[in-house]
Image: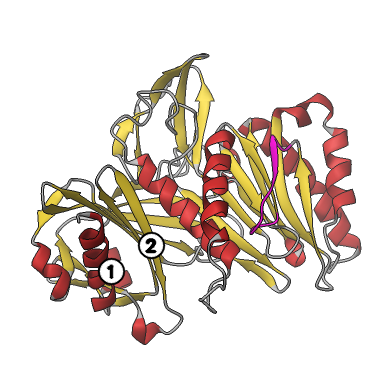
Amino acid sequence: MTVIALINPEHDPHLIADCLISADGPDKRQSMSVWVPSLGLIPTDWHDADGPFHIARMGRKTYILPNNSGMLAFAGDCRSAYEFWVALAKSIDIKLGYQPDAMIDANTIDQVLMSMGQTAGAFHMLGVLLDGKGGKCAYTHRPEATMTTQNFGTCYLAGSGTDYLESQIETEDERFTSIENWPWAHISPTEELAESLCSNMLYYESDINNGRKPNTPIHDRFGGFYEWYGIKSIGIKPTPPRIDLNILVKDDALYLTRLHFSESTHPAVDDPDFKGSQIILKVLTFCLRTQEFDPHRLFDNLAFTFEQVEGVLIERFFNHYERDASSPLSDPRISGIVPADVLQKDFGEGLPVKRVRLTVSVNGYAVVKGVTESDESLAPARIQYANGQVSVAFSEKIGLLIADIVGRHLQ
């Protein structure tokens, strides 16, 4: 199962999808663990009210259509969704064989779904189709919830996490209603919603009871990580590089609880392990264990240093079905400690990060803020690898923002 959402398709369409791939029954593989960003290495076997299930891997459930025709996201039974994708790919190949620049329209998708019979009822699909002339339209197949909001147009949702995500959108819609004039030119209200939802749910994943109690993501078979895309007339805007910084205030002390960096990357065209053009999500976790830090550092070059970084690559889930059993990635749980040469390549010259999502847990609830800068010179964070260590340094603005949140909520 999963959770997907299509937000504001009328005016500023965005797609959200989680990355947890689960299957019914116990895990029969030799390695019975999987790495997820907010919890680290966890067991693959779990139980819910319907019986045992296991986490197969992390995987992207989104698909970019050729010729800038739009994007689709899937929820439900993965095998059935894969069968749809195979049939759709064949239909697209035939269509493009006659007309290489043809757009993939709703009629093409409808015909494939009808040809599948009852199998089409085993999965859900949400997306946006582009007509090549600036027009955009929503495409939905078996949405499980449709909601009309004041600030984000119509929202469609599907998957086992529908109820949770629906409640989050309702909460954000109420909060945004109090904002009379949108103050930021470099991020739209819908994009802010999409990114904040993905960051907030990633924070929610770190709950120690995740999977062990009902109404938590793993127990309800969704989660892991959340990607978002903006569907523009000129193309698809993928999840941009972002840092998620989680802080806990407890007994007048400050603790770093989680620190993630995520970005969308493209494999080399000739990479034998990743067939075809696709987006791969890279998620690095610098901190999985709570560590106290001096509050005075908020006012003096706030930075954290780490000797080890763990990470996961999240590829399109379809790829696993097409990969040869002899491939080194025949088991697509692509995670582990990030090698020093990779850290040097990515961060040796320093990487400015223009987006930071901050979550400060204080007095039993979380205060969330997003900082986005369009100018790289004003980036709120910078990642640097040197002398075998990775440092994540934050701007003065971030330190003062944390101090302000702590001060206002401890009074």
Q: Residue at x 25, y 55 (%)?
A: 409
Q: Residue at x 57, y 65 (%)?
A: 189
Could you tell me if the residues under marks 2 and 1 are in contact, i.e. CB atoms within 8 Å? yes
User: Which quadrant is the N terminus positioned in?
Assistant: top right
Task: Depth check: give the residue in front, 324 or 124.
Answer: 124
Q: Which residues are magenta?
A: 143-153
- Tell me the kind of residue under disc 2: Lys
Q: Is residue 121 magenta?
A: no
The dot on residue 86 is: none
Figure check: 390 above or below 259: below
Residue for badge 1 = 401
Q: CA distance from mark 2 to mark 1?
A: 9 Å
| Secondary structure mostly taken by the magenta-highlighted segment of the chain | loop
Question: Element at badge 1?
Answer: helix
State left or right for residue 94 relative to residue 317. right
Q: Is residue 358 left or right of residue 255?
A: right
